[in-house]
Amino acid sequence: MNKLIAVVGMSGSGKSIVTDYLEENNWTKIYFGGITYKLMREAGIERTEDGKSEKEFREKLRKEHGPACYAILSEEDIKNSLEKSNVVIDGLYSWSEYKYLIEKFPNLKLICIVVDKEIRYERVAKRPDRPFKREDIIYRDLSEIENIEKGGPIGYADYYILNNTTTEDEINRLKEILERID
């Protein structure tokens, strides 16, 4: 059976580095955020530079379809992809999404990327795609923890990668983890 993992962590922790690495190594990446962008395009809603339109749209989706909506909307894609390859989920945020998916896919493993808060804030401020000012990332952190149950999957992860140093160290730890996953 092919492997299924979801990479979780706070914004700027290095989740994309892990999911991109796996995708480059023939894993199928399922990006929950892609659902938001696709449905926004279909509804004729523009993405704003500050991310406000995306946040409002995500909240609308969760209000309409429940807190597990991204897992529900991705279930078929996950199932079909697992028939062909290993799958990595990028963007599992909520405890409800995790509970839904673990019931459907008992082999799901969570890998959490953690970084000291100050290092993460510095990285987010400097990143070329969607940089955030310190006060904006603090607001986002608190909003994700309080409003979308983000702490659950982080606290309940099967494996952790401490990403305070280099990308090379992060990937080496990922490789160790992959060897341990059945």
Image: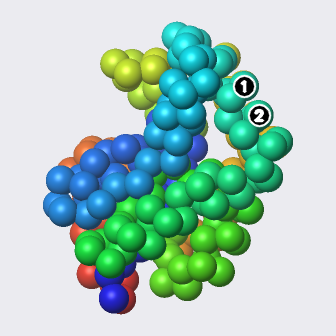
| C-alpha distance separating marks 1 and 2 | 6 Å
Residue sitting at x 54%, y 65%: 75
**Rendered-image quadrant of the C terminus:** bottom left
Return the residue at label 1: 56
Residue found farthest to the left = 25
User: On the picture, is 101 further left or further right than 24?
Assistant: right
User: On the picture, is 20 further left or further right than 99?
Assistant: left
- Going by the numbered disc 2, the residue's amino acid type is Lys
Residue 60: mark = 2
Residue 106 visible to the viewer:
yes
**Rendered-image quadrant of the N terminus:** bottom left
The residue tagged with tag 1: helix, strand or loop? helix
Callout 1 touching callout 2 (CB < 8 Å): yes
* Residue 69, x across and y down, in percent: 69, 53
* Residue 73, x across and y down, in percent: 59, 55
User: On the picture, is 145 further left or further right than 165?
Assistant: right
